[in-house]
Image (cartoon, grey):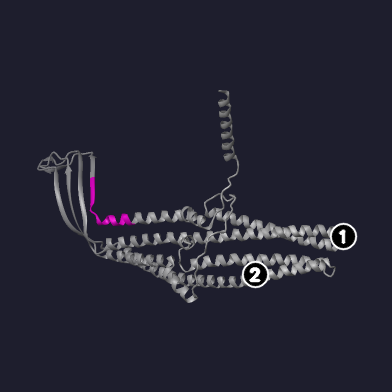
Amino acid sequence: MNKYFNNFKIILISLIIFTAGAILLPDISSALTLREGLEIVTSQNKDVLLSQIEENAALAQLSKTQSQYYPRLDISGSYTVQAYQPEINFGSRSIPMQNQNYVAYGVSLSQTVYDFGHTTHSVNTASYYANSNSLNIKVVKNTIALSYIMEYYGILNADRIIALSQIQVKNLEARLKDTIELNKEGLNTKNDVLKVEVVLSDARQTLLKAENIRSLDESRINKLLSKPFNTNLTVEDIGKEPEINYTLDIAWEIAENERVELKAMKEKISAKEEEIAATDSEYYPNIFVSTGYQRLQNDYMVKDDNWSIMAGIKMNLFSGGSTKYQSQKTNEELRELKLINEITLQDIKLQVQDAFLSRKLAAQKLEVSNTTVDQAKENLRISEIRFKEGIGTSTDVLDAITLLNKAETNYWNSVYEIKISLARFVYSIGMDIVSQYCSH
């Protein structure tokens, strides 16, 4: 019995320790991939959620406007208390004509028969605005996705630079140690030691700067992921990239047809045109029919309730020029939207050209820096041999170490610059980033 009890205690204690560890130890999550991050930011980012709220509001406005097609049903009820009972003079005496206090209630049903397109244009206006808000969600998601990719590759690049800086610092620390020993033996001067210390100090500052950049990139990507800014984040460089090769002219043509911002702007322009038509229709009458039942408590009437049906026409003859000025205002807003559409198209073409040229330049820089790295490695190898043989100086070695670090830094900067410029190019021509990066 004691044996089983002891086993139970061991299991219980282990469970408590495991639970406490799970609570107290820092969260060690798996590395974040490009695909996983894109799925998170395009579904949970606050800007995306905000745009969805705006779409819901636009759809609610559409439903509200469509309700004008349906008849209106009103019900009313009241109880009136009067200071005097209503009476009329009849000869030398007065005759009551209504109860002093009375109850009244009724119900009415009215329907617009024809309003010269005012309701139809209003519904079309709301529909176009709803479509514009729906398209805006795609714009926000694509923009957020691009921001995530840029920060994602920024962290990967920062990790590379940090690793290179750490290697440089380690090599320089070893170099400083050797230089100090040589100085003790009288094989070099104090100035040689000072040179290594200066270069080492500069390398350490470069490392600190790279770590700071990495920290800022991490905070920005955590913001996109809706996580606390200080969340430790590890990213993993896996996944294929889309293969897209277009000439600049073709890219411009694709962007003009595919950029969602332009599609959304067309919806807004159509909405404003329908709004103008709805405003102009207010110059014309509104034809309607209504029916209802009304009961007014009155002991002096033969019947105190009645049914009615009515067909009528209603038209505003004067409102201080309200309709006229509203029409002018809406026409000016339409002109503004059309001008904004032209400016947006020009900006988009500029974005396409910038991304296209940046991608081309990054590829050229990568080709050059790849060769430079090999040359810098060979230069360091030769400088170290010359120094050991006594025909080279320690300054030559320090310069070679610095040049190699710079060459490798330029190489990785070019690698990730190509990746970022590709994402910018995909975005600029209007392609959906998530589908392009997550379908491979």
Mark 1 surroundings: few (<14), some (14-19) or many (≥20) residues within 10 A: some
Residue 290 x, y percent position in the rendering: 18, 53
Three-letter amino acid code of the residue under disc 2: Asn
Residue 102 x, y percent position in the rendering: 20, 39
Residue 178 x, y percent position in the rendering: 82, 59
* Quarter of the image where one finds residue 20: top right
Q: In what element is the residue under mark 2?
A: helix
Query: What range of the chain is rendered magenta?
Result: 62-75
Q: In what element is the residue under mark 1?
A: helix
In this rendering, position of residue 230 left or right of residue 301: right
Q: Residue furthest right?
A: 186
* Quarter of the image where one finds residue 117: bottom left
Which residue is more in the foreground, 369 or 424?
Answer: 369
Q: Which mark is residue 343?
A: none
Inspect this view and state whether residue 77 appears.
yes
Q: Is residue 257 magenta?
A: no
Which residue is more in the foreground, 95 or 91?
Answer: 95
Residue highlighted by disc 2 = 370
Which residue is more in the foreground, 195 or 107?
Answer: 195
Residue highlighted by disc 1 = 183
In this rendering, position of residue 224 left or right of residue 372: left
Mark positioned earlier in the residue sequence (1 or 2): 1
Mark 2 surroundings: few (<14), some (14-19) or many (≥20) residues within 10 A: some
Q: Are marks 1 and 2 in contact (CB under 8 Å)?
A: no
Q: CA distance from mark 1 to mark 2?
A: 37 Å
Q: Nearer the viewer, mark 1 or mark 2?
A: 2
Three-letter amino acid code of the residue under disc 1: Asn
Number of labels in the image equals: 2
